[in-house]
Image (spheres, helix red, strand yellow):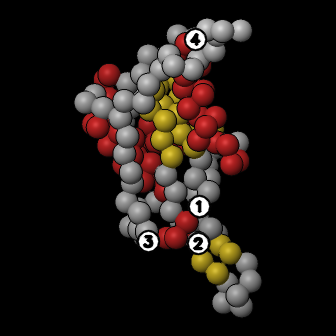
Amino acid sequence: MAGSGLGGKYALIGMAESDVGIVPDKSPRELCVQVTLDAIRDAGLTLADVDGLITCNAFAEPIMYHAEAVAEYIGWQPRHCVTVNTGGGTTFMALNMAAAAIEAGMADTIVVAMADSLRSFMTRASDGGAIKLGTSSL
């Protein structure tokens, strides 16, 4: 049906890139905080202008309620806060969910953020076998 759907109705207005490479002094969550704040600044906005956050969970440090943890780290309480984890299509799903949330009136301006640090937090066992992920030891 012509004219239906979300295509062409919403725009990306800011973007950012986290530190890349081996970044052992920042967890994946801290990198996500970095890109969230930098994208807001790039858009010429402040936290007060943004009422939604959708994050893609990090592979190196997967946690439940990732978006809420990022918002809490910042000291921010967006009215719409969602963590997406749908495998290889996560970033596309997150963008679609942001547009749908705006369409439904759940938020007006949403940051979609994803950051990971596989090069910093993946280590191979001494026998060359298993790979250990994460920023904390078991």
Q: Earlier in the sequence, mark 1 or mark 4?
A: 1
What kind of residue is marked 4?
A: Ala
In the image, farthest residue toward the bottom: 127
Q: Which residue is mark 4?
A: 104
Circle 4 SS class:
loop
Q: Residue at x 67, y 43 (%)?
A: 89
Residue linked to disc 1 = 60
Q: Residue at 27% across / 36% down in the picture?
A: 41
Disc 2 secondary structure class: loop
Q: What SS does tag 3 mark?
A: loop
The percent position of residue 131, horizontal first and vertical second, equals: 68, 75
Q: Amino acid at mark 1?
A: Ala
Distance, label 4 to label 3, CA atoms, is: 40 Å
The quarter of the rendered structure image containing the C terminus is bottom right
Residue at 44%, 71% in the rendered image: 22
Q: CA distance from mark 3 to mark 2?
A: 10 Å
The image shows residue 116 at horizontal and vertical percentages of 52, 57
Can see residue 137? Answer: no
The residue type indicated by label 3 comes to: Ile
Q: Residues within 10 Å of mark 1 (few under 14, many from 20)?
A: many
In the picture of the structure, the residue carrying the numbered disc 3 is: 22
Do the residues under discs 1 and 2 have CB atoms within 8 angstroms? yes
55 or 9, nearer to the observer: 9
Contact between labelled residues 3 and 4, with CB atoms less than 8 Å apart: no
Mark 4 or mark 3, earlier in chain: 3
Which residue occupies 35% across, 35% down? 14
Residue 34 at x, y percent in the picture: 36, 49
- Sequence-wise first label, 3 or 1: 3
Looking at the image, residue 73 lies above or below residue 129: above
The residues bearing labels 2 and 4 have C-alpha atoms spaced at a distance of: 39 Å
Q: Residue furthest right?
A: 129
